[in-house]
Amino acid sequence: MADPSVAAMQHATPLLRHLPQTSLYSAIVQLIHRGHDDRARALESIGVHWQPYVTHGAAAALMRQVSALHTRDTLAVADQLPSLGLPARVVWGGVDRFQKVSYGRRLAADLGTTLLPIPRGRHFTPEDHPEILAAAINDLLPPAGAQDAQDAQLPSTPLETR
């Protein structure tokens, strides 16, 4: 189920094209602030994300984005996720207002991995907590030098010359 603000925007997409750009800017600013727990990073994010909206027609760009927000693609492959056999970790904002942590629990279970909730984290955890996300990724990687040892055991293939 979609976040109430996302659901409301999806129902209102036909009206979005008639809103002045300043109204859209206010709406996007509000959504970005709701998704961040770090005010400085939220302000930086606004600066980065607003320009593409303006470049691609703010109303049309927002309408495309909002109309594409749905879960059907993920749900369509959910039963196949456990068979991927890939290392995975799910990092989720513990107080995400857009996608509840229960969704993260389900995704982690579907992937056969653990959930790492960030207690005060909201939606934009990669921007607000890059160090936590980087640590979770690093935990999945082989130790430094392990790949070099594996590569040293592989037969070398001559390079093709032209």
Image (cartoon, rainbow, N blue to C red):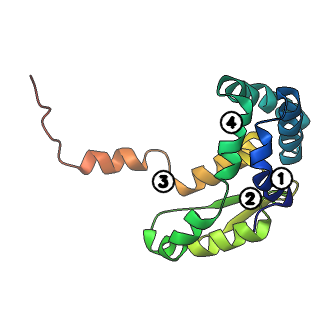
In the picture as drawn, the residue positioned furthest to the left comes out as 162
Horizontally, residue 120 falls left or right of residue 62, namely right
Q: Earlier in the sequence, mark 4 or mark 3?
A: 4
Front label number (4 vs 1): 4
The residues bearing labels 3 and 1 have C-alpha atoms spaced at a distance of 27 Å
Amino acid carrying label 1: it is Gly
Amino acid carrying label 2: it is Trp
What residue is rendered at 53% in x and 71% in y?
A: 76
Front label number (4 vs 3): 4
Q: Earlier in the sequence, mark 2 or mark 1?
A: 2
Asked if the residues shown at circle 2 and circle 1 are in contact, with their CB atoms under 8 angstroms apart, the answer is yes
4 is higher (above) or lower (below) than 77: above
Residue that label 2 marks:
92
Q: Earlier in the sequence, mark 4 or mark 1?
A: 4
The residues bearing labels 4 and 3 have C-alpha atoms spaced at a distance of 44 Å
**Residue 43 percent coordinates (x, y):** 86, 30
Amino acid carrying label 3: it is Pro
135 is higher (above) or lower (below) than 16: below
Residue that label 4 marks:
60
For the residue labelled by badge 3, is the local secondary structure a helix, a strand or a loop?
Answer: loop
Residue that label 3 marks:
142
Which mark is on residue 121? 1
Give the quadrant of residue 140: bottom right
Asked if the residues shown at circle 4 and circle 3 are in contact, with their CB atoms under 8 angstroms apart, the answer is no
**Residue 3 percent coordinates (x, y):** 81, 60
The residues bearing labels 4 and 1 have C-alpha atoms spaced at a distance of 30 Å
For the residue labelled by badge 1, is the local secondary structure a helix, a strand or a loop?
Answer: loop
Amino acid carrying label 4: it is Ala
104 is higher (above) or lower (below) than 131: below
Q: Earlier in the sequence, mark 2 or mark 3?
A: 2
Q: Residues within 10 Å of mark 3 (few under 14, many from 20)?
A: few
